[in-house]
Image (cartoon, rainbow, N blue to C red):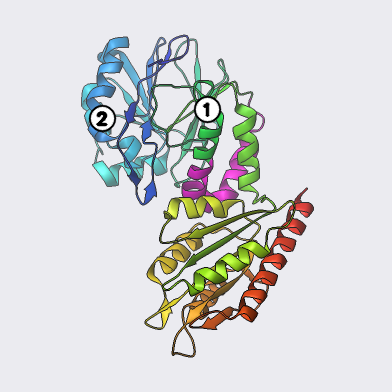
Amino acid sequence: MRKNLMPNIDWVGAVDWNVRDFHSYNTDRGATYNAYLIRDTANTLIDTVKGPFFESYYRQVADLADPASIQYLIVNHAEPDHSSALPQAVKAFPNAKIVTNKKCRDTVQKYFGGADWNWQEVKTGDSISIGSRTLQFIETPMVHWPDSMFTYVPEDELLFSMDAFGQHVASAARFDDEIDLDIIMDEAKTYYANIVVPHSKAVKRTLDAAAGLPIKMIAPSHGVIWRKYLDSILGAYGKWCTGTVRAKIAVFYDSMWESTGKIAEAITQGADLDGVATVMMHVRHNSLTRIATEFLDTAAFAFGSSTLNNLMMPAASAALVYLRGMNVQNRTGFAFGSYGWGAKGGADQVEEYMKAAGWTLNRPVLKCSYRPTQQILDEAAEAGRELARIALEVAEKQG
């Protein structure tokens, strides 16, 4: 397990091989909790790890430096996956100042106490000399919590980016050129779609603020460290945070006796135009994590549900609530579905929810009673073709 980033800068984090749920985010490839040690005149730790992994973290630090020599412990973010080992670290590194911004200090104290810890508050523009290196601090509120912060080492052009540019990948490899790039870019997209996307405006401000920094390496708090494919991850973030989409449509649905499923198939088949990517997902058979990831770069979509107790299906409701929470705007689509003996049903409720989410409806709800007739299926195919045309137009405008 390679740990060295640069001379006297080492990874001292933890690999969580078995975690599969991260507050409702499916981590199918596990996760890492990255922390770093800088050995200099003033030995400095960048973050801690999740509490259960403290012993491993401590052993790695102690193998490289006398715990009593740690003079600074930088806390870039208060979320427990990074900070829940902090109470143990304060005891283990008794001479360390806890360096963070005011919001982070307040949040840490709400979680763990620590009013009597040796705190040093910093803000954007502040710096600390640790010997041959300088630590510069950039507050990055809402990327993705109000307390989030970057730490930058100008002498090495190294950015400790906290959750930004992260991915949930458990691996013995530490760097982006040691794992298949397609895998880590897919995980980076999944991470953005499920964690960061509600705060895209803040991400854009942060990218703009950091644009003037020369950067040779980005060390996030989850996943691999970026040293070779910086252009790939920075370019992707530039697209994701500005809402850039592909010529792509998604058809999401839940179906009881496959009537809504048949409409979904007809929509998907109708959308099969040259240059348009299509994806069809049964929401009960796919995780919310994958649904949100597919939605991230979708230009247009259809969402369908059959009717259960005069309402949409529970899994359809859960998916819509999750997507709405992602706050992805500038999406066009329509609702569809089937119902039985009632005059209204799941599809109507889907449409109401789409309106409430602020998504543009390009046509009225498409629905059928019991089973779709050929006329309904033909209408569904035409509706799919219209979605595909919309997706092409949006992608063309975005260039």
Q: Quadrant of residue 93?
A: top left
Q: Secondary structure at mark 2?
A: helix
Magenta span includes 208: yes
Magenta span includes 207: yes
Residue visible at 49% across and 86% down? 344
Q: Quadrant of residue 237?
A: top right
Residues packed near mark 2 inside 10 Å, few (<14), some (14 to 19) or many (20 plus): some
Q: Is residue 398 above or below residue 344?
A: above
Q: Amino acid at mark 2?
A: Phe
> What residue sits right under mark 1 in the picture?
180
| Camera-side residue of 198 and 253 | 253
**Horizontal side of residue 112 vs 308, given as left or right:** left
| Camera-side residue of 71 and 377 | 377
Which callout, 2 or 1, points at the residue further toward the start of the chain? 2
**Is residue 94 in view?**
no
Q: Position of residue 293 (x, y in %)?
A: 52, 50
Residue visible at 28% across and 37% down? 84
Q: Is residue 137 above or below residue 202?
A: above
**Horizontal side of residue 114 vs 163, given as left or right:** left
| Camera-side residue of 378 and 389 | 378
Residue visible at 45% across and 47% down? 146
Q: Secondary structure at mark 1?
A: loop
Q: Position of residue 22 (x, y in %)?
A: 35, 45
Q: Which residues are magenta?
A: 189-213
Extreme residue toward the front, this view: 374
Q: Position of residue 168 (x, y in %)?
A: 42, 37
Residue visible at 22% across and 24% down? 55
Q: Position of residue 105 (x, y in %)?
A: 36, 40
| Camera-side residue of 206 and 295 | 295
> What residue sits right under mark 2 in the picture?
53
Measured in 3D between alpha carbons, the distance from the residue under mark 2 to the one under mark 1, in whole angstroms, is 27 Å
Q: Amino acid at mark 1?
A: Asp
